[in-house]
Image (cartoon, rainbow, N blue to C red):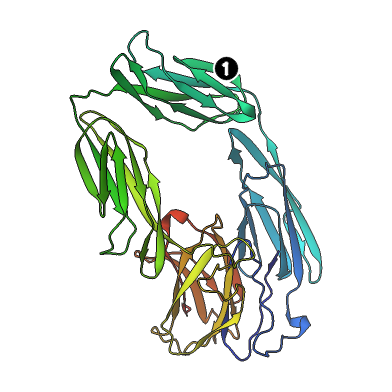
Amino acid sequence: MRDHRPTLHRLTPWLLALACAAVLSACGETGGQQPPPEDEIPNGTLVVAVTGLPSDAPANVAVSGPSAFAETIDASETFVGLTPGQYSVSATTVSYEGIEYAASVSGSPATVTDGGTATATVSFTATSTDPGDLVVTITGLPVGVDADVDVSGPAGFSESLAASQTFTDVDPGTYTVTASNVSDGDDVYAPTVSSSPATVPAGGSVTVTVTYTFLDPTAFGTLQVDIVGLPEGTAADVTVTGFGFEQQLTQSTTLTLLTPGNYEVAGANVFADGLDHATIITGSPALVLPDATTTVTVLYQPFVPIDGDALTNPGLHALFRNTSPNPVSVAGLLFNAANPIDTKGIQLHNEVADPANPNDFIAFELIFGQSDTRRINIALECGREREGGGSIIRARLLVAGTFNSLGSVNCNADRNFTLDSANGRDYIVEIAAGH
């Protein structure tokens, strides 16, 4: 449930709440402040019911209405504290596990009245669940040498292959193809699998290719290990092993004259700038082929460890950079106070200069925790509006380094954002003068 009622703070001009999706960030009374009269608070409710999708399939539903209200949701949601008026609900087709689900909306536009509840329903229906075909093509082996290929998929599907094969009339969904080395006497052939996992569409076909390559022991290959994500000057802790070979790496390195075959790349955590950095490795184990270069990427990503003090799923940790000349204080504990913090949300308030001072702003980084929670809600509540209209301040979500804005939140509004975990620390929340 999302509460869109503005709270008028008489003692502090603004308050910001930041919370992970799993946490309700509702702002109540703070600092002894008195709430505004009930008749000044918008009190409409809109229920958006989403039905017909598999439990883990996200919808794409847009809700818009008065006072520039705009939200995108991926499941059923209840909005409270809405300004009375007409609210539009729309949805797009969802593709999930090879099946397309068409959306139909009833009850839109929905009329929200003060103190009343309106309902709009988004119903999804599968357009087709017809079986499809999975084609597995195997190449590169001498005549008479069997491949070693396994295929798995929905409803317990499991098959082993020695040669190319087409599976007809299989259930739509995602199929995984894996392959192992095979020998022909002393000759070893290593596989490369392309397009796996593969999604078989309803009534359609998809192809996965397994290519075997002879590992010529008289030839050499190259392994490029790219290490990114650590603060400048920080040494990585990466190990490459294979065929009696072992080497420690502290930075990006090109390894040459390697015997063809599979190499493992592993990384240990590194502590830098007050944070642990863990690795996300793409491309390992790496198949080094004769006269070719194989690349593995090691991404170091800072994280807040689960230290046992969180009662719910930890998501993000805030590192503050207090650039405001006015004091900043926490107005609500949406997390517990242990250090390090398994942060579930933060609520703070501060005064800003008026007229606007460009040097008066608050900014903090978002650090990912050890969880899959990647959706946040930013709510900004202001004690007064700018003379002549407009938002006296605004909160922006920025991509660090580029400072590209992913969107902003004006006074007495809130907005949901979905973050890409691959970017690690690269998000900044800034609260500054509005426009």
**In percent of the image, x 70 and y 37: which residue is there?**
125
**In percent of the image, x 37 and y 24: which residue is there?**
181
Query: 392 or 331, which is in the foreground?
Result: 331
**In percent of the image, x 59 and y 35: which residue is there?**
97
Q: Is residue 361 visible?
A: yes
Amino acid type shown at disc 1: Thr
Q: Secondary structure at mark 1?
A: strand
Q: Is residue 271 above or below residue 319?
A: above
Q: Is residue 294 left or right of residue 179?
A: left
Q: Position of residue 29 (x, y in %)?
A: 69, 83
Q: Quadrant of the N terminus?
A: bottom right
Q: Is residue 426 left or right of residue 291?
A: right
Query: 101 or 247, which is in the foreground?
Result: 247
Q: Is residue 93 left or right of residue 161?
A: right
* Disc 1: which residue: 168
Q: Is residue 376 above or below residue 114?
A: above
Q: Is residue 18 visible?
A: no
